[in-house]
Amino acid sequence: MAETERHVRLFRNGRNQALRIPREFELEGDEAILRKEGDRLVIEPVRKGRLLALLDSLRPLKQEFPDVDDDLAPLDEAEL
């Protein structure tokens, strides 16, 4: 079972406080979301493109959809 907790040291990087993330806790990508929950800091990776990947994995629908414009009243030129 992988470790879920590890003692780390905080240090200064210019005006920012920082910490080194041990290899077993590395996040994918090069961006993360940081939020504070009480006295805890939570770091989550930014996951980009997941919706597009999901949509690409879906099969096309075979069902025909009704034309929703059929029942609409025509627009007057003044309304445009």
Image: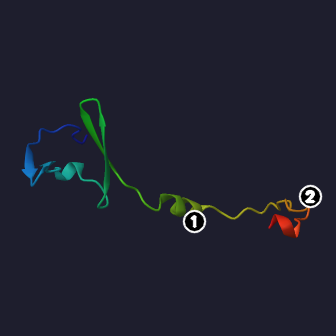
Out of 63 and 12, give the one closest to the viewer.
12
Under tag 1, what secondary structure?
Answer: helix
Under tag 2, what secondary structure?
Answer: loop
- Reading the image, the residue beneath label 1 is 56
Out of 16 and 56, give the one closest to the viewer.
16
The extreme bottom residue here reads: 77
Residue 43, picture quadrant: top left
- In the image, which is nearer the foreground, mark 1 or mark 2? 2
State the image coordinates of residue 26 (x, y, percent, origin top left): 24, 53
- Crowd band around label 2 with a 10 angstrom C-alpha radius: few (<14), some (14–19), many (20+): few
**Residue kind at label 2, given as amino acid type:** Asp
State the image coordinates of residue 55 (x, y, percent, origin top left): 58, 61
**Residue kind at label 1, given as amino acid type:** Asp
The residue sitting at 91% across, 64% down in the picture is 74
Image side of residue 64 versus residue 24, left or right: right
Q: Are marks 1 and 2 in contact (CB under 8 Å)?
A: no
- Reading the image, the residue beneath label 2 is 71
Image height of 42 relative to 62, above or below: above
Image side of residue 34 versus residue 19, left or right: right
The residue sitting at 24% across, 30% down in the picture is 39
- Crowd band around label 1 with a 10 angstrom C-alpha radius: few (<14), some (14–19), many (20+): few
Position of the C terminus by quadrant: bottom right
**Of pointers 1 and 2, the one earlier in the residue sequence:** 1
State the image coordinates of residue 38 (x, y, percent, origin top left): 28, 29
